[in-house]
Image: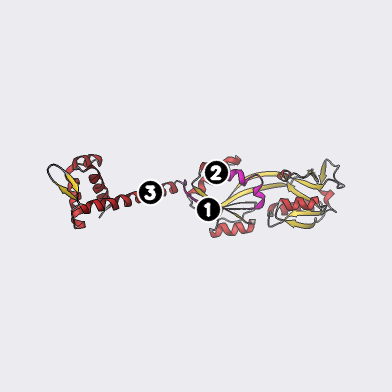
Amino acid sequence: MELRHLQYFQTVAEELHFGRAAARLNMTQPPLSQQIKQLEEELGFPLFHRSSRAVELTTAGDVFLGQIRSILSQLDRAVDTARHTARGELGKIIIGFVGTATYEILPPAIKEFRTIFPSIDIELRQLSAPNQLNALLNGDIDIGFSHPPVASCELISRSLKKSECVIAIPKNHRLADKQAVAITDMMNEPIISLSKEAWPSLYEDFIQLCNKHGFQPNIVQESTEYQMVIGLVTAGIGIAVVPVSAKKLFNLDVLYKKLDQEELIAEWIISYRRENHNPALFHLVHHVLQRTSLF
């Protein structure tokens, strides 16, 4: 029994006329009549009562029609779902993200994407940069919002955003009156830092900048989150180098100063496995890169 036989039967059953059914199916009547006879022979019972004046369903044919309609309807839905999935309009994307991506990159991007593709399920998992790398390579997540570097030929990484860093200091600090803070001003200061696990490139760049000026920074506390860093600055525990987006954590007790004559750059990236063929992922990557204008 072939699918076309069931479709032929349903059309004849709906029209109760072989001529009209053949016209709907874009075929001639004799081949259609022959296909229905073959189906009846395979089933072992008649589907129609035929006379010179009318075609009627048998009792068995009527029952068979009810079942066939359900099967064909489910098949149509399956084909439609698969088609939308193949186009990336349905499906699921698992996203890994570092905490720093939640301040200005991830929330608006995901909000807009869900508006455009409401039928794609999004699962979010907060993971450190190293854990994201492992999750990507293992196929546990589809894409990661993180920081460089990502050293794997199995992954594709694209830059999302770069911004300068500033120095966060308590408002009553000895450096509070300076327009800009030199890196050497930090030589004897206790430093609160975003951890190397949270932001490998920024952590290493800061260490190297201090070493370039002849000292090792006195890092007294590390954290994976902006809020904790700024909270410790507020408490007078130390000063910190943070991306300029940290200013959005408005705090009357903290001042933000430019770094004098030097530059530290904070960068966010997306990474995904080269062999990930999830169609929905393509749409997310396209959307995020288009939004940040970094194709």
Residue type, numbered disc 1? Arg
- The tag earlier along the polypeptide, 3 or 1, is 3
How far across and down, in percent of the image, does residue 112 sit?
A: 56, 42
Mark 2 or 1 closer to N-term?
A: 2
Name the residue beneath numbered marker 2: 113
Task: Quote the CA–CA distance across marks 3 and 1.
Answer: 31 Å
**Disc 2 secondary structure class:** helix
Colouring method of the image: secondary structure
Asked if the residue under mark 1 is in contact with the one under mark 3, i.e. CB atoms within 8 Å, the reply is: no
The boundaries of the magenta stretch are 89-112
| Nearer to us: label 3 or label 2 | 3
Gap in Å between the C-alphas at discs 3 and 2?
A: 25 Å
Is residue 212 shown to the viewer in this render? Answer: no
Can you tell which mark lies on residue 274? 1
- Asked where in the image residue 108 lies, by quadrant, the reply is top right
Measured from the top left, where is residue 234 in percent x and y?
80, 50
Q: Categorize mark 2 by other alpha carbons within 10 Å: few (<14), some (14-19), many (20+).
A: some
227 lies left or right of 278:
right
Pointers 2 and 1 in contact (C-beta within 8 Å): no
Quadrant for the N terminus in the image:
bottom left
Q: Secondary structure at mark 1?
A: loop
